[in-house]
Amino acid sequence: MKNRIKVFRAMHDLTQDALAHELGVTRQTILAIEKGKYDPSLDLAFKIARYFKVSIEDVFTFEEIQ
C-alpha cells in the first residue's frame, strides 16, 4: 500500500519521532509505514488520517497485486 505520510509530515513540519509520539507508536513504525515495509492496522491508518484532518484515501492508496 502506498502512502503520503512523508508529504503530510513535511506540510506540518513534523519529524517521524514527533508524529509517532502523537499517535502512540514508535518512530520505527512510522519509518516502516513510510517505506512501504509495513501496512498499518485499520485503527492506526484512521488515526493518521484524523491527525492530519484528511480522509484515509488522501493518505493511503491501495495497489492491487496482479
Image (cartoon, rainbow, N blue to C red):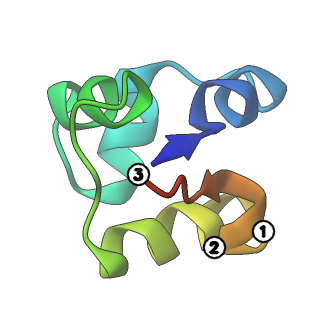
Sort mark 1 into few (<14), some (14-19) or many (20+) by Cα contacts within 10 Å: few
Vertical relation: 28 (above or below) 62:
above
Q: Residue at x 78, y 68 (%)?
A: 53
In-image side of 44 versus 38 (left or right): right
Q: Nearer the viewer, residue 38 or 6?
A: 38
Vertical relation: 59 (above or below) 4:
below
Sort mark 3 into few (<14), some (14-19) or many (20+) by Cα contacts within 10 Å: few
Dot 3: element: loop
Q: Are marks 2 and 1 in contact (CB under 8 Å)?
A: yes
**Amino acid type shown at disc 1:** Lys
Q: Residue at x 57, y 42 (%)?
A: 3
Residue tagged by mark 1?
53
**Image coords of residue 43 (percent x, y):** 33, 81
Q: Tell me the tag on residue 50.
A: 2
Q: CA distance from mark 2 to mark 1?
A: 5 Å
Q: CA distance from mark 3 to mark 2?
A: 27 Å
Q: Tell me the tag on residue 65.
A: 3
Quadrant assignment, res 52: bottom right
Residue extending furthest toward the front: 66
Q: Nearer the viewer, residue 60 or 64?
A: 64
Q: Nearer the viewer, mark 3 or mark 1?
A: 3
**Amino acid type shown at disc 2:** Arg
Dot 1: element: loop
Which mark sits nearer the N-terminus, 3 or 1? 1
